[in-house]
Image (cartoon, helix red, strand yellow):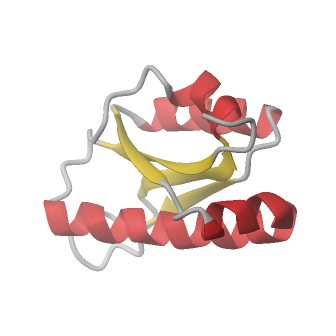
């Protein structure tokens, strides 16, 4: 790993029991929102991430409280955070927070927050 390794981490709630296709769509929403935010906040890091293959990792969390705690930690570290709230047209109620994108950001910063989480 170099000092400039950049990735995006998507934290996905497993307590709301979404089907695989629904999870895939929510993760896609998070990835797009997160990349747009990072492009504005940190264009140099965004460019490194985009040109380097757009590394992404999806991990599981077990509650909204856990998502909010991770969100707060990421914001304290100046990591872009994009939270996805579902429109409620299919499997979950309107406004349900399903997942969040952290970054793209330096892997070293993200790992301090997410390295103990299990892959999705």
Q: Residue furthest front?
A: 2
- Whole-percent x, y for residue 114 in the image: 52, 29
- Whole-percent x, y for residue 98 in the image: 40, 55
**In the displayed structure, would residue 21 be above or below residue 63?**
below
Residue at image location 37% in from the left, 40% down from the top? 59
- Whole-percent x, y for residue 69 in the image: 60, 29
Residue at image location 44% in from the left, 20% down from the top? 116
Q: Residue furthest bottom?
A: 89
Toward which corner of the image does residue 15 lie, by quadrant? top left
Task: Examine the rendering and report whether any part of residue 35 can be seen.
Answer: yes
- Whole-percent x, y for residue 81 in the image: 67, 52
Q: Quadrant of the C terminus?
A: top left
Q: Is residue 98 left or right of residue 90?
A: right
23 or 89: nearer the eye?
Answer: 23
Residue at image location 50% in from the left, 55% down from the top? 55
84 or 42: nearer the eye?
Answer: 42
**In the displayed structure, would residue 93 be above or below residue 90?**
above
Residue at image location 74% in from the left, 36% down from the top? 3
Q: Is residue 47 left or right of residue 101?
A: right
95 or 31: nearer the eye?
Answer: 31
Q: Residue furthest left?
A: 19
Q: Is residue 100 left or right of residue 35?
A: left
Task: Examine the rendering and report whether any part of residue 92 can be seen.
Answer: no
Q: Quadrant of the N terminus?
A: top right
């Amino acid at each position: 790993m170099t000092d400039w390794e950049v990735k995006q981490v998507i934290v996905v709630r497993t307590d709301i029991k979404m089907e695989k296709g629904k999870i895939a769509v929510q993760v896609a929403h998070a990835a797009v929102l997160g990349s747009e935010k990072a492009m504005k906040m940190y264009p140099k890091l965004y460019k490194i991430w985009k040109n380097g293959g757009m590394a992404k990792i999806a991990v599981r969390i077990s509650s909204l409280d856990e998502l909010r705690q991770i969100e707060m930690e990421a914001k304290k570290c100046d990591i872009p955070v994009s939270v996805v709230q579902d429109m409620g047209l299919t499997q979950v109620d309107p406004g349900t927070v399903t997942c969040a994108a952290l970054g793209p950001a330096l892997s070293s910063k993200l790992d301090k927050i997410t390295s103990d989480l299990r892959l999705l």
